[in-house]
Image (spheres, rainbow, N blue to C red):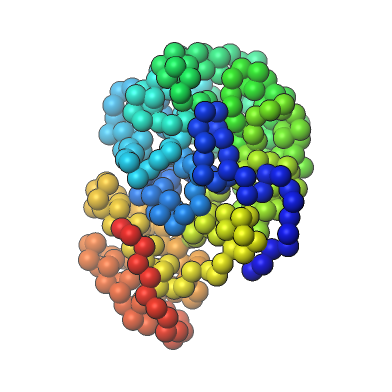
Amino acid sequence: MIAEQNNHPNIAKPLAVGPLQLRTNLMLAPVANYCDLAWRITCRQEGGVGLACTDLLSPQGLLRGTQQSLDIASTNDDDSPVCMQLYGGDPDILAEGAVWAVEHHADVIDINMGCPVDKVTKKDGGSKLLCDVPRTLKLDDTVALALDQASKGRVPLTAKVRRGWDSTCIVAPDLARQLEKRGVVLVTVHGRTTEQRFKGEVDHEGIREVVQAVDNIPVIGNGDVKEPEDAIAMIERTGCHGVMIGRGSFSAPWLFNRAWNLQTTGDAGEEPGEAHKIACARAYFERMLRFRTERYAMHHIGMRISWIGKKLGPCKPLKECVRKAKTPDDVRRAFDEFLEGGLRLFPAKEEPLGSPGA
């Protein structure tokens, strides 16, 4: 699709996160149980990702060295630059977690101030931090000081927020303004309240209020970006400096590349073909097997096939076959059979095979 010429200054402008210069203005969001190393690299291989974030990290788990936390935080040379996002309500523990992250190759540290999930907010983390701004600012001061001492200013501190807890508690503009004064170099805003979770439409005006509240730091818009045109609309309507994409990428890891192409050339390019989509799913699965365990990979491909299938047309037989798979070879055979024309509700159209790197 060809986009109309747009002169908004933030379109096609790569982001700077403190001292870190990114290649684009697009970020992969931190989403619990979805943004593991295998998925981050899968999105990066498709192109367009300026910065990718880990799943939410428990600083207590990192400091205790629990296997789950270490697995979630794992990274490698293909996963750069990477943001490690910490959650919790204890300033000292968060500060220690930030130091741990610096020592384990984080390029950016983000404090989660926006997760609406009960198991996070009940521990005074996530969007619960929106309910007591003075306390949250003190928490930020503690983390910022420890981070600066540990990295000597090399690793910047950012924050991800929601608009507020509910419609009576819209604190994001003031909070962002105060965080900027305390050394936070970028704020990402999900344009909903905690109460809304993921219901209703994202509030672009609410994000715009945060953009207008800060002086110099970039503000990133987040929420409901499902197509390349949505990223353009987010920037145009809010004035934000970049876009963070989470759920919109789960069925389309190539979304970042198409959104960046649309910004830079006016043409997002064609949606990838069926073979390319299966190749992406296969590469993701093989990476999970390499980076984690077979049990993990089998569980997650069974969970993720519903998202992957959204871009494959009527493919209920494929999804059922992958969910019922007992071994990695069963999953591989299901992908092969689909490419050969089976495991679908309608006959396949012939097209060239795709092969993203595994």
- So how many labels did they put on this image? 0
Q: Residue furthest bottom?
A: 347
- Relative placement, left or right, of 23 versus 76 is right
Between 350 and 126, the one nearer to me in the picture: 350
Between 68 and 190, the one nearer to me in the picture: 190
Q: Residue at x 73, y 59 (%)?
A: 5
Q: Residue at x 40, y 31 (%)?
A: 106
**Quadrant holding the C terminus:** bottom left
Residue 98 to residue 202: above or below: above
Question: In the rendering, at what x and y percent does residue 75 appear?
Answer: 34, 39
Q: Residue at x 60, y 31 (%)?
A: 186
Between 181 and 128, the one nearer to me in the picture: 181
The quarter of the displayed image where residue 33 is located: top left
Question: In the rendering, at what x and y percent does residue 51 appear?
Answer: 49, 41
Question: In the rendering, at what x and y percent does residue 307 appear?
Answer: 47, 60
**Residue 295 in view of the camera:** no
- Relative placement, left or right, of 76 versus 111 is left
